[in-house]
Amino acid sequence: MSDILDILDRLIGFDTVSARPNRDMMDYISDFLATRGAKVTPIAGSQPGKSGLVAVIGPETEGGIALSAHTDVVPVEGQDWSRRPFALTREGGRVFGRGTTDMKGFVACMLEAANRAAQARLRAPLMLVLSYDEEIGCVGIQEMRPVLPALLGAPRLCIVGEPTEMAVATGHKGKVALRAVCRGESGHSALAPNFVNALDLAADLVVAIRALQASLAHGGARDDAYAIPYSTVHVGLLSGGRALNIVPDHAELTFELRHLAADAPQELLARIRASAEGIAARHGAAAGIRLETLTAYPGLDIAGEDPAVGLARRFARTEHLTKVAFGTEAGVFQEMGVPTLVCGPGSMSGQGHKPDEFIETSQLEACRAMLERVVEDLRG
């Protein structure tokens, strides 16, 4: 555990909020792995200072096991922290700092496992995948995706170490984030009925989205393994207008769709587009609504009988299977044909994204033990 905490201390010291570069942290990780004999392949992101990597320890054969994590964290601005967010603070059985739970605690365990694997004689490889910009819509892993199959081959299992309190998660919903840009006509508010108010278009679209949500809740697909057992549509931002006495000619709303595996996102988006087209048509030729996809990532859904699930349960020493409310990068690996589960230390609902974020050292110990069993399996 002391090695993990020392590594975690270094990792927390890097301010890798998604809006900032992660270069310094990736240089530290690359050097850590390369000095232990890993084959490290950096993968540059589309934005300056952003990168991921794939590291392989052991023979480049089939049947290895991949561990995956993201390096970015959410912002601390606007949160009331009583401790320094980018310095590890140890108090009793907890360690505090931004990213301890989501998800640098798992990264520290990955690196400790890599150190152990480098000293062993492996029959199949241990592979580490580190990404960036996960917190803003799994952007980094999708930029990395074209080169991943050649670097990873065909692992028996990929463990994405998002916080599940070390339960094995077999699923999460997919997500599409969208912006609707509403076009109207400007004019003096005294003559408002003569013009198309863009905020009216936006409001009508919000009503249509709420109607879609009601139909999904009452008659859509269901999966009772989730806290919210149906697909959801949520409007998070609405803006428009310049002054009270001017009819707004522009309004925007930003919304998201979190969909079950049984609900094809294309079909749900087609219903939203049809509603938008109908609303614009009712308001006349001067009206328009344009939908833009901002980010999207696939959901995860793996059958409980899949051999990879049994393997993950053996490593984690748990019978507990769950599905998580939050999104992860796991669906990207599954779409690549890699059997993927989510299992990692910490509690997203209890600690993730909160001020004074922390992780229990007992969770880190449980993760260390799981990854020790992974390395032992690869020794065979």
Image (spheres, rainbow, N blue to C red):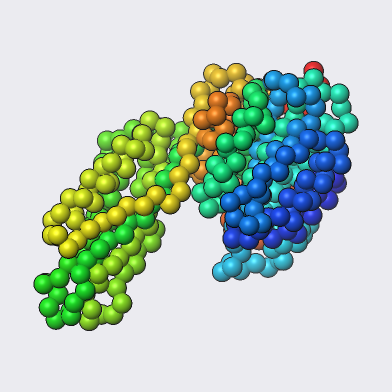
Q: In percent of the image, x 60 and y 18: which residue is there? A: 307
Question: What's the residue at 82%, 45% (across, down)?
Answer: 32
Q: Is residue 41 left or right of residue 32?
A: left
Against 244, is 143 above or below?
A: above
x and y percent of residue 374 in the render?
74, 27
Q: Is residue 351 visible?
A: no
Question: Is residue 270 positioned above or below 310 on the image?
Answer: below
Q: Quadrant of the C terminus?
A: top right
Taking the image as shown, residue 305 lies to the left or right of residue 213, namely right
In the visual, does 189 lie left or right of 320? left
Q: Residue at x 17, y 50 (%)?
A: 278
Q: Quadrant of residue 145?
A: top right
Residue 138 point in image, percent of width and height: 54, 46
- Number of numbered markers: 0
Q: Quadrant of residue 156?
A: top right
Name the quarter where the N terminus is drawn: top right
Q: Is residue 95 above or below residue 111?
A: below
Using the rendered image of the protein, determine whether residue 115 is visible from the camera's viewpoint. Answer: yes
Which residue occupies 69% across, 20% down? 63
Task: Report x, y in % for residue 160.
Answer: 62, 37
Taking 32 as reference, is 99 left or right?
A: left
Q: Is residue 210 above or below residue 181?
A: above
